[in-house]
Image (cartoon, helix red, strand yellow):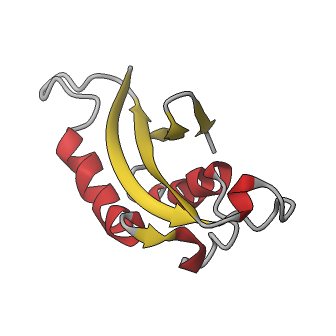
Amino acid sequence: MDAYCEFSIAAGRRLTGVPTDHPCARVHGHTFRVRLTVSGPVDAASGFVIDFAEVQRAFAPLYDALDHRFLNDLPGLENPTSERLAIWIWNRLTGHLPRLTAVEITETGASGVVYRG
């Protein structure tokens, strides 16, 4: 079974890997939606795949590092595409959420990425 938690992060960025006339080459911002999915069996005693509070605790330091920040300033996010943001989050969570199976980033209501390691 899959269980997930969603978070909203407001952040600014400038994509450095696109042509200079591309709109995303300029500084802009998004309210990103981050969905973290954990997969596994339902525990017989708790009835949970995972306690949502555990996911929230694991993500809290990353939330603080990302929310209301300029993503380009973070090591590893010098070109902060949604794809790279998903990988960045995955790499920092895998030791804290061992059954993490997906990191989804939505940057608009209709556009996003899913990273599964």
Q: Which residue is found at the position 28% from the left and 61% from the top?
A: 60
Where residue 97 appears, as percent x and y from the top left, is 39, 50
Q: Which residue is found at the position 39% from the left and 71% from the top?
A: 65
**In the orientation shown, which residue stands out farthest toward the right?**
19
Q: Which residue is found at the position 57% from the left and 50% from the top?
A: 86
Along the viewing direction, whichever of 70 and 75 lies nearer the viewer: 70
Left or right of 48, for residue 38: right
Q: How many marks?
A: 0
Q: Which residue is found at the position 39% from the left and 57% from the top?
A: 10
Q: Relative to 61, does residue 56 appear above or below in the rendering?
A: above
Where residue 29 appears, as percent x and y from the top left, is 51, 58
Left or right of 19, for residue 113: left
Q: Relative to 81, does residue 73 appear above or below in the rendering?
A: below
Q: Quadrant of the N terminus?
A: top left
Q: Quadrant of the C terminus?
A: top right
Q: Relative to 113, does residue 74 appear above or below in the rendering?
A: below
Quadrant position of residue 58:
bottom left
Where residue 21 appears, as percent x and y from the top left, is 83, 59
Along the viewing direction, whichever of 89 and 74 lies nearer the viewer: 74
